[in-house]
Image (cartoon, rainbow, N blue to C red):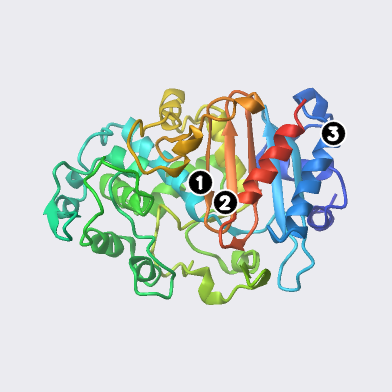
Amino acid sequence: MTRFVAAFLFATGAIFVHPLAAELGQAVGLAAVKDPAKLGFDAEKLDAVFAAQEKLIADKQSPSNVGLIVRRGKVVYHRAAASRMAHDRAISDETVFPIWSMTKPITSVAAMILHERGKFKLDDPVADALPELAKVRVKTADGKTEPLAKPITYRDLFRHTAGFAGYDGLYHQDGFWGKTTRAKSLDWIIGELAKVPIGHQPGDKYTYGMSTAVLGRAIEALSGRTLDQFLRKELFRPLGMKNTRFYLTKRNRKRFQPLSVFENDDYRAGKPAEDELPYAKEVPLYLGGEGLTSTMADYARFCQMLVDGGKAPGGKQILKPETLKLMWTDQLGDIPGYDDRKNGNGFGLGFYVLNDFNRYGAEGVFGWGGYHTTHFWIDPKNEMYAIYLCRRYPFNAETLKQFRKAVYEAMK
């Protein structure tokens, strides 16, 4: 099967799993399973996964989208559903997506490489590497500020208890996020972030924001390399993630999935400014929390490493299994502020930790999502992971809910 024919069939959803799964399997370095039943999946119910993807389009929950299921190192399912919108584009195996906050797990894994090398302990002050963080001020109830009562630690950055916000408005507004999108470098924006009083003392509350971007800057200080250089050497090259970077090459810009913006009960084409980040090689804005672009095959390689206990396809150990297990163990405890705590779930070191998955016969599920409605999760007990990618603003959690439900219902 030629790449052109495979991409066409993939985009139109014209065939069942096998040729497409083989195509992606080859890209990821995995075999495609010929009989899903051998891996605990019902072939007819896998068709229902595709039906769920199409229904998300019909219900205006999603534009064109693609789903992947891998179990025990074999591609069980890989299929794309295409919308009929003129501005949208059918997804192929070469489509590039902005993965936004799915960058956070990658940066967190990269930081833990340095942790294993003894560069920092989880409860060390980050100010040892980034001195500007020692001077951060904290907002008080009376509207004033006070100094830090305790240092911001690496654990605080991983689990979002450092107090850093930063997601305070849209790209064209005057808030800190607007300033971030116009910044020219990572070190400058982290320096500016350190000047903004944080909302609470470190460790007192979960505040989702730019903590992982700060972690990325700490990686630079500890390693002596830019975050871009560190990720390429320590993760992307060993894993074969050839299309994952902070900028778009000329070729990848043509493969960049168009943005669909949902407003007034319908979709419209996104404007270039609504990409929000420049994705330009000449702008070293290496945001470790939100800045990467990637493909399905590349992110699958990252997920496969997590399932394989930290081992790259060539055998290189990226992280120790016990380190990974620590990362997907809840780190929040009784710390307030995490909205999903009401569902019994927690947050580890760069990943959500789902404890309400027993109904699926799963335990210790971890993962995360991205701003333009991308999702992944790892199911260690079932030796499985799944990825769902589209490009929709605003973020829609219903896509994950429906896709994940269909995936587990397809398991025998």
In the displayed structure image, the side of residue 351 where residue 97 appears, left or right? right
In the displayed structure image, the side of residue 267 where residue 235 appears, left or right? left
Q: Earlier in the sequence, mark 1 or mark 2?
A: 1
- Residue 236's disc is 1
Q: Quick one: SS at disc 2?
A: loop
Assess disc 3: are there few (<14), some (14-19) or many (≥20) residues with their C-alpha within 10 Å of its C-alpha.
Answer: some
Q: Earlier in the sequence, mark 2 or mark 3?
A: 3
Q: Earlier in the sequence, mark 1 or mark 3?
A: 3
Q: Quick one: SS at disc 1?
A: helix
Q: Residue at x 54, y 54 (%)?
A: 99
Q: Quick one: SS at disc 3?
A: helix
Q: CA distance from mark 1 to mark 2?
A: 7 Å
Q: Residue at x 44, y 31 (%)?
A: 319
Three-letter code, disc 3: Ala
Residue that numbered label 3 is attached to: 43
Residue 122 visible, this orientation:
yes
Q: Given contact means CB atoms under 8 Å apart, are the residues at marks 2 and 3 in contact?
A: no
Residue 233 lies, with reference to residue 186, above or below; the image says above
Residue that numbered label 2 is attached to: 242
Assess disc 1: are there few (<14), some (14-19) or many (≥20) residues with their C-alpha within 10 Å of its C-alpha.
Answer: many
Report the mark closest to the observer, 2 or 3. Answer: 3
For residue 363, which quarter of the picture? top right
Q: Given contact means CB atoms under 8 Å apart, are the residues at marks 1 and 2 in contact?
A: yes
- Tell which of 344 and 395 is nearer to you: 344
Assess disc 2: are there few (<14), some (14-19) or many (≥20) residues with their C-alpha within 10 Å of its C-alpha.
Answer: few
Q: CA distance from mark 2 to mark 3?
A: 32 Å
For residue 361, which quarter of the picture? top right
- Tell which of 211 and 298 is nearer to you: 211
Three-letter code, disc 1: Phe
Q: Quadrant of the C terminus?
A: top right
Q: Position of residue 371 (x, y in %)?
A: 52, 57
